Image (cartoon, rainbow, N blue to C red):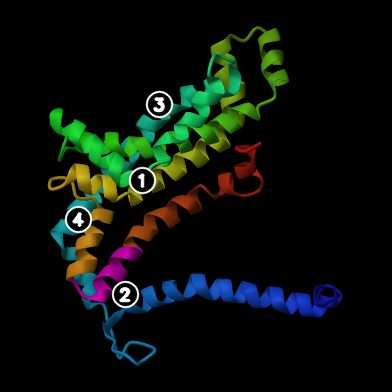
Amino acid sequence: MKLTWFLEHPALRRAVMLSFVLAFGAFLIMPLITLLLWAFADRWFFPNLVPQVWGFKWWGWILENTDITKAAKWSFMIAPTVTLLSAVICLPAAYAFARFEFPFKRFLYVALLASNAFPKLGLYIAIAALFFQFRLIGTFWGVVLVQLINTLVTMTWIPAAGFSSVPRELEEAARDLGASPLRVFFAVTLPIAMPGVIVAMILVFLGSLDEAQATLLIGAPNIITMPVQMYTLVGNYPEPVGAIFSILLTIPSLVLLVLARKFLVSGYLAAGFK
């Protein structure tokens, strides 16, 4: 009876839904606002709601710190490398899953989730033991290889959905006009599936840029990326340092998403999942 009464009052329903939206928005936005306040706070003590002293003292410290500069260099070397290698390895597999029938296809397709089905730390420890035998601990390529594990599902499933969405009639029409299979792929199939490929590459790049556990375990002490450096900053320095570094970590992601927005809106993202 009470539920029926609630459903019969549109104004009450809108008020309740608006309350939920505002509460959820506050839940998401308040930590970001706090982060921004800390980033420009020279002194901020409880119970004050805003910093007592504003300034850029810690910004200068962050930007002049050589360890942070080195961490940024490693991050922006590893993330593109992981993205390109993942594309080279996974895109042919994605096309095969989308276009061909072969034994155990469904099993292999679902088996890609195996790397996400178990606690990652245990998997990384097992990989570290193997990498130790091959002298990959503390090396650039050791970090790249361990990060590739996290890209398998994203770089295979999303492009496979994109390739599946390409109408076979268009490919057959191109073949009827004399195009070779390779020409059909690059002139017809790939351009139509490209939104799904671009989305997958964006997600892989951002995932590599933010990855910390595997990088810390495999890369330390020689390869320290920005997320790994974040652990040291948060644990050993004042709150403004962690806040500023969090903002710096967010900027590349925002810039990349803005540059790739045409693939993420207006139905382009959906094209990769049809």
Q: Tell me which segment is drawn in magenta.
A: 237-247
In the displayed structure, 97 sits above or below 219; it is above
Q: Residues within 10 Å of mark 3 (few under 14, many from 20)?
A: few
Q: Of circles 4 and 1, which is in front? A: 1
Q: Which residue is mark 4?
A: 69
Q: Of circles 3 and 1, which is in front? A: 1
Cα–Cα span, label 3 and label 4: 29 Å
Percent of width and height locating residue 33: 43, 76
Q: Which label sits on residue 88?
A: 3
Mark 1 or mark 2, earlier in chain: 2
Label 4 is placed on what type of residue?
Thr
Label 3 is placed on what type of residue?
Val
Cα–Cα span, label 3 and label 1: 27 Å
Q: Is residue 222 left or right of residue 211?
A: left
Label 2 is placed on what type of residue?
Ala
Q: Which residue is mark 2?
A: 39
Tell me the quarter of the picture where residue 254 sits: bottom left
Q: Of circles 1 and 2, which is in front? A: 1
* Residues under numbered marks 1 and 2 in contact, where contact means CB atoms less than 8 Å apart: no
